[in-house]
Amino acid sequence: MGAGSVKILLAITQAFALTMSVAFIVYVVVIVVPYLRRKPAPVGDAADFTWHFFVPCRDEQTVIRETVRYLRSTFRHAHVWVVDDDSEDRTARVVKSIWRRNGGYDPYLHLVPRRRPEARTGKGDALNAAYQALNFWMGSDASRDDVVVVVVDADGRPAENCLEVCAADHLFGDESVGAVQLDVWMGNADSRPPGKNWFSRAFGLKLAQMQDLEFRTAIAAIQTSRGFTGTISMGGNGQFTRLSALDSIAGDDEQPWRGSLLEDFELGVHLLTAGWRTGYTPDSHVKQEGLYSLRRFLVQRTRWGQGTMQCSRYLRRIWDSPHVSTLGAAEMMYYLAQPWMQLLGSLLYPIPFILLLFSTAGDPAQVWTWFADDGAWILFAIYGSFGLLPFIVWGPIYQFKCLKSRNLLRGLGMGFAYALYIYTFYITSWRALFRLVRGRNGWAKTRRNTEHAPGVKVALDS
């Protein structure tokens, strides 16, 4: 391939990649402004509603004891429904030991046991089992509009103010609101992981901080901007849903959650297309465990990416829904396109550098002249800057807004680290695609930081 052909191909690929980068920069600017301008909203009265926490568990003996204790002590008048998804450890035994209180039984704590072959088929099925158990427990004559179901992961810690925040007039105080999503924080973002290897400890801490940065800035900004498009989505942790909203999409088989690996986003799609509004609030939060292990992180994000790909089947439903605006449909379609765009980007973005490398090997003098004297380096500088800037900006924002620190240099360092962190999504998108093509749609649980490898016994307190 001649130098002229290389230049033309470089120009084409760079132009296309720059177009995608500029579009993404515009998108980031659009979501940053309302995120930074938002002010806290008034709260409501939690006593206006009845609250039920759903905690799906699959082999969660290492975390479930403290989670149940926290929920029962913090939200004394809320019910806690622990779903034991045929755990192979002592999850059920731990819950039963908490269940017994002062020689009696805790009327606010419920255990929903599941057994194979129905069990271990996904988080959505576990939540459906809790929903069905709640229906049976309440009876057919109970009021349902003022009942709210709260999905909390086995490591989740909802903030103490979450109930009154969600009871506010603009959230569940508005009868058209069917679901509300809390802000998500990593509770261990400032806790150095155990271990003898200093590098693995430092890397694990930085990985947890990147997850905290992602959720508290980029994802929070996206959710805030979705308030204008009416397409706020649900998350897997800190997800509040009105029981009557779940009823409206459950069907005769009583299954409001469906079979996607991204069951939280899928639930939001069904609520929105059924005519319910969804809300988001950063005025309260739920803390969860950020992963220290890159391997476990990749497993988790592969599952999320595959779930997003599976939800592409709802594109027609979204577009045809009279309850979703054109702008809202476009926003949801953009979200569902993300893993496919990452696949395309992973093929497209490296091309200019690969072509430059081959061209340099063939005629280094001519390439140097083109690069230095003809100003091609400027194009590459712009190309690289546009690819990094939309991610680097979140570092200073996280430092100033979330950590309340004015250390700009550390914020920029966090931004560059976040840009590197984002590139893992190109890996997980390809992994998700391979799983999808091979028909591997099973749900793979991500092990906790404190969990040992399978087969290793863990001592439990009684």
Image: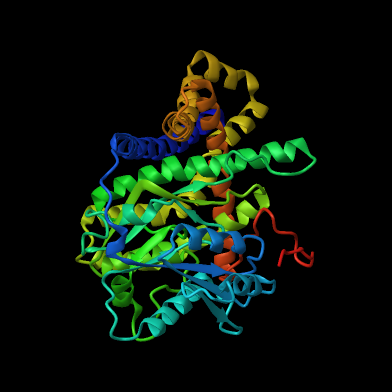
Tally the numbered discs.
Answer: 0
Q: Residue at position x 38%, y 51% from top?
A: 161
- Image quadrant assignment for residue 36: top left
Q: Is residue 13 or residue 53 the one in the foreground?
A: 53
Residue furthest out toward the front: 102
Would residue 316 be seen by someone viewing this image from the given angle? no
Q: Position of residue 405 (x, y in %)?
A: 47, 26
Q: Residue at position x 59%, y 45% from top?
A: 188
Q: Position of residue 42 (x, y in %)?
A: 25, 46
Q: Is residue 411 or residue 131 the one in the foreground?
A: 131
Would residue 392 be seen by someone viewing this image from the given angle? yes
Q: Answer with left or right where residue 427 lies relative to residue 240.
A: right
Q: Is residue 393 or residue 37 the one in the foreground?
A: 37
Q: Position of residue 412 (x, y in %)?
A: 51, 26
Q: Residue at position x 60%, y 36% from top?
A: 354
In this picture the colour scheme is rainbow
- Image quadrant assignment for residue 90: bottom right
Q: Position of residue 153 (x, y in %)?
A: 52, 61
Which quadrant of the rendered structure holds the N terminus?
top right
- Image quadrant assignment for residue 386: top left
Q: Is residue 309 or residue 199 the one in the foreground?
A: 199
- When the figure is inspected, residue 139 is found, relative to residue 47, above or below; the finding is below
- When the figure is inspected, residue 385 is found, relative to residue 188, above or below; the finding is above
Which quadrant of the rendered structure holds the C terminus?
bottom right
